[in-house]
Amino acid sequence: MKKFLLSLGVLAGVLSANATVYTVYEPKLSEFTGGNDGYTSTLVVDGKSFTLTSEKAGSTTNLISPNDNDYSWRIYKNSKISITSADFDMKGVRFTIDGSKYAVAVTTGSGWTGELADLTYTFSNATGSKTFEITADGGQVRVSKIEVSDEEFSNDTPDVPGEEATVVKSIAEILEVKDGTAIKVDFPMTVAFKSNNNVFACDAERNFIQLYGSNEYNVNDVVPAGWEGTYKLYSGTTPEIEPATSFPAADGDNLFVPSVVDASAINVDMVNHVIAVADVVLSEASPADKSNFTGVSNGTTLNLRNNYTLESVAAGKYNMTLLVQVYQGAPSLYVINYDADVNGSGVAEIETAEGVAEFYTLQGVKVANPENGLFIMVSGGKATKVLVK
């Protein structure tokens, strides 16, 4: 199955001339009902009825409906999609994932396990050939089309070369290409913030983009040049890159210090930026759960969100580190911490007496007694990463 992981081309299943193939899912092909726990859609094609259901993974907080974007349905880790038909004998199922077609052979009473788009899936024929299930064992993929057939699709079709990747030398150049373009990243980036598989990185011009996929990065890691991926404009607002295979290993450190931004200057064009905002006044305690709240800085109201479930802080004035996202056409600011460096010094510029060390989190917050984690140690005017156990 390794050829599936390396190819960006189209793999087409081979069927006989008498095979019947129905498309049971494409974006906005039919209406889905449901909510965060799952979605259901029933589609009738040539008198044949197909029901698609999704089941939310216990570890996720949201399962995106196919109605929510124009190009794909996300399957999350441990979530499940089922295809059922009462009057069509499914023997083959084919998924189009991130622009490439993957054939799945299905036979009565048996399942099939393979690797698709750098992820492993388990397929089962739960109740015979008229029900088909796919469960994501790791990560997530975007499904843009699902087809079923009364004959098996072949998995042995040779790879068809994909289009040549567009070489980009900055994030600004990435933002100029079309959604779905294969790109080769020919410049380094510095990790500014990370949350699970979501990495927010900037280039030398301090433009930002989201890197999505399994990775081992930490804040301040340098993502080297020379890897390929696909540019995606998620939900039409959030620029991101998904790697063609996997992200490269970090190539050294480059201390990231957020730029201090006046609250009145924040706009939707700053999506993915990690910034610091001074003197944000909270009129009441911040929420401890994933909730929205507001703060005011220099007369400008900020729409804040505790997306990373930080501990509640009391009403008062704070210097915040924020991640700019976009919700309903307006900036939504995810709080990273409530104690940002707004003096413009940066950890690397802090002087200490020879032999006396000071410690900071990877976000630049000073820590009096560091323990059990990765910190920046500043001593003798030099900053280095240290692991404290």
Image (cartoon, grey):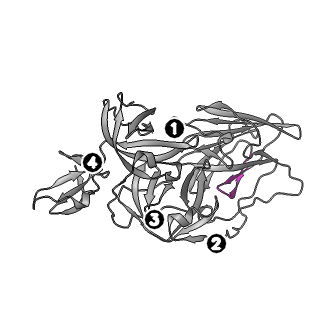
Residue, disc 2: 164
Q: How busy is the neighbourhood of tag 3: few (under 14 within 10 Å), some, or many (20 plus)?
A: some
Tell me the chief SS of the magenta region: strand
Residue placed farthest to the front in the image?
299
Residue, disc 3: 248
Position in image of residue 217 (x %, y %):
40, 57
Query: What kind of residue is marked 3?
Result: Pro
Q: Are marks 3 and 1 in contact (CB under 8 Å)?
A: no
Q: How busy is the neighbourhood of tag 2: few (under 14 within 10 Å), some, or many (20 plus)?
A: few
Query: What kind of residue is marked 4?
Result: Val
In terms of depth relative to the viewer, which is nearer, 347 or 360?
347
Residue, disc 1: 60
Residue, disc 4: 365
Element class at badge 3: loop
Element class at badge 2: loop
Of tags 3 and 2, which is closer to the observer?
2
Q: Are marks 4 and 3 in contact (CB under 8 Å)?
A: no
**Dot 3 or dot 2, earlier in sequence:** 2
**Dot 1 or dot 4, earlier in sequence:** 1
Position in image of residue 252 (x %, y %):
34, 66
Residue placed farthest to the top in the image?
284
Asked whether residue 196 appears in the rendered view, the answer is no
In terms of depth relative to the viewer, which is nearer, 174 or 116?
174
Residue 91 is left or right of residue 225, and the answer is right
Query: What kind of residue is marked 1?
Result: Thr
**Dot 2 or dot 4, earlier in sequence:** 2
Element class at badge 4: loop
